Amino acid sequence: MTSPSQRSTPSPASPAAVTIRDVAQAAGVHVSTVSRALDPNRRQLISAEVLKQVEAAARRLGYRPNRTASALRTGRSNFIGVLLPDITNSVFPPILEGIEASASARHYFMLIANVRDAANGKAVLERLLAQQVAGLIMATVTRDDPLVEFVTATGLPTVLVNRADDSGRLGAVVSDDRLAMKFAVDHLAQLGHTHIAHLAGPQLSPTGLGRRQGFEQALRDRDLPPGQIVECTAYSREAGRVAMQQLLSSAPRPQAVVCCNDLVALGAYDVMHAAGLRVPEDISITGHNDMPLVDLVAPPLTTVRLPHRELGWRAAEMMFDLILGKPGLASTVVLRPELVIRASTAARPA
Amino acid sequence: MTSPSQRSTPSPASPAAVTIRDVAQAAGVHVSTVSRALDPNRRQLISAEVLKQVEAAARRLGYRPNRTASALRTGRSNFIGVLLPDITNSVFPPILEGIEASASARHYFMLIANVRDAANGKAVLERLLAQQVAGLIMATVTRDDPLVEFVTATGLPTVLVNRADDSGRLGAVVSDDRLAMKFAVDHLAQLGHTHIAHLAGPQLSPTGLGRRQGFEQALRDRDLPPGQIVECTAYSREAGRVAMQQLLSSAPRPQAVVCCNDLVALGAYDVMHAAGLRVPEDISITGHNDMPLVDLVAPPLTTVRLPHRELGWRAAEMMFDLILGKPGLASTVVLRPELVIRASTAARPA
DNA sequence: GTGAAAGCGCTAACAT
DNA sequence: ATGTTAGCGCTTTCAC
């Protein structure tokens, strides 16, 4: 005869939340019957009549099952962790959207942690583990990241996205950086350029290294001479400016510059404009990522489009396969990028 | 004498997770002592010696407190819900960053729900409530949104961001849309324009209405004649194209167009280019939001910059005040935007 | 087909 | 200063 509000020790957060006990009482059945009736998978164990009564009572009382309690009891949460270096970087929102689509279809929630400083990575991961996340997606990993070791030791189902794991211990979904560079170099070569430079990303990041190697390989495949390479300190417009400045100060001036990403390419634009050089008449420029609006800058940027949403979606699907114990078919999935030709690349003057 | 692996009924998700009981046993003390020793707020109740032993045991065993269990016991989760209409819309990532900064400083996690279709809003909210979120931040609200009624009824501490609540029932943190429009109109008036039009946002959204009213008021304040107003069906480049087309087909052609956001302004660019009209020589254009890269489009867009990160941060702080039962000092916080003058606006030809 | 009972891992009275 | 005890709300054997 205990009323919902008659509970004792810890006072409920919201005033008198309705529990499964209240529903059982209202429906005149046992709590376990309510539990079964409200679970789609076990609903059929219940007689039609009782089922109806339970559902009516639940609705009438405004019953909302407490996921915290069921998670504790079953040992299964419906959370996945997502580690990002910078949510305002435009490559991540579509990746998140892909992850979210996969997760919410399974009624999972993402716990997003924006790990600005890599030194915090382990602490954040500890907090995520304390929340009993069922799996993890990491977009933060650098080469030889100690976090990979740590997360492997925990046994948490983990997949990397947008970054491969050199050690091969973790699954990953990435875009084909080498192919992307081949697309860019081939396009420039077809335009008649022979002296092609590269503004490379930080060589600590797998993408930075992969794109640089892809660039070098693509030149070799075409029998072109090795191009100048300047390493940027970051994937930013500012870093692009610095690198381009450095590139231009070294003779001879390249006919084309393949940039590790769009922001770096836009930094190169800045330096060219400041130096009175024209894109693409004096130097052709290519980017990487196809950020929103790079089709509207002057000149519209030729770049490589990555399947960002697909990247996130596939990474999440792979992680859920791991969670469900499905045999891992692929350890690294490599998705195909696409060259988008706009107006920042042009034929070499005859 | 039960070993960690000897547990019975529900098999643990990860093999033999270390519990507080294991630590207690290893340290030779009671679980409640461990609980106290590991809580910064109650640590001082424990003798230095025992404290050291407990900490050593916890570290040695790799103990990780289970937040699910403590949340169930205390009735307090460390989750906040965040409702977004579209995470790939560039205004939201910096807002999320601001929310995340506030939340993670308090050791809370965000549960982000991307509510693409407003019809799903209530279902998503139910799922969020089932997770026992301590508070909610909504960026999805339309005017007279039924969700406001629903969430008010639940009593969940809720704050709107980037959208005010017409009914005044919920706290909100917004940018000053009227002031923004005044900035834009004053700027154009100073350039000599007298015939100024507005591509308005959907009038169902609070921002769409507020900006439109701000526009009209700003014209009146300057004793300018009422301008033509075309309502866009969305805040998109495509909707901007459609609206601009409609505006140009009606005589007389305006000297300047104030757009409800940057994408709409870029849609207006498209139509102008297609019609052989020049920005700003033939028509000046202003945007709203200062999206990334609009400083690099041709011509660089004059627009209104919103303090997006601050918006998110303040909304989260307000929500946490509500959660902690602090007296709500402000129901709606209005932040000041800033006009960024670039090259899409110019003086009226004499 | 339904009920009884146990217990997930933790915290907070209440002892002592 | 530490131990005892009683649950938080739910699911899942095990009976009947």
Image (cartoon, coloured by chain):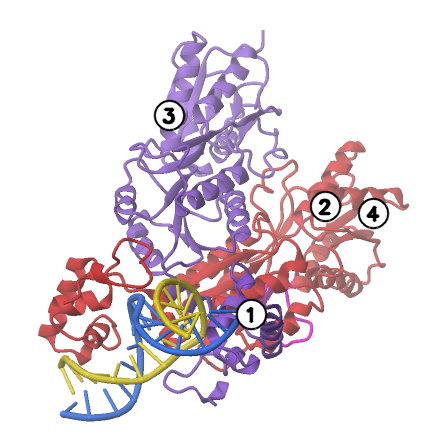
Chain colours: A red, B purple, C yellow, D blue
Q: Chain of mark 3?
A: B
Q: Which is nearer the N-term, disc 2 or disc 1?
A: 1
Between marks 3 and 2 in the image, the one whose residue lies nearer the viewer: 3
- Marks 3/2: CA–CA distance: 39 Å
Which residue does the numbered mark 4 point to in the structure image?
Answer: A254
- Marks 2/4: CA–CA distance: 10 Å
Task: Determine the secondary structure under disc 4.
Answer: loop
Q: Residue furthest left?
A: A49
- Marks 2/1: CA–CA distance: 33 Å
Quadrant assignment, res B290: top right
Task: Report the front residue among A119 and A106.
Answer: A119
Which residue does the numbered mark 2 point to in the structure image?
Answer: A285
Q: Which mark is residue A159?
A: 1
| Residue B108 screen position, x and y as percent | 49, 55
Task: Report the front residue among A228 and A238.
Answer: A238
Residue at 43 percent across and 10 percent down: it is: B221
- Marks 1/3: CA–CA distance: 47 Å
Q: Residues within 10 Å of mark 1 (few under 14, many from 20)?
A: many
| Residue type, label 2 | Ile
Q: Chain of mark 2?
A: A
Between marks 4 and 1 in the image, the one whose residue lies nearer the viewer: 1
Is B137 positioned to the left or the right of B118 in the image?
right
Q: Residues within 10 Å of mark 3 (few under 14, many from 20)?
A: many
Task: Report the front residue among B289 and B266.
Answer: B289
| Residue type, label 1 | Val
Quadrant assignment, res A52: bottom left
Which residue does the numbered mark 3 point to in the structure image?
Answer: B230
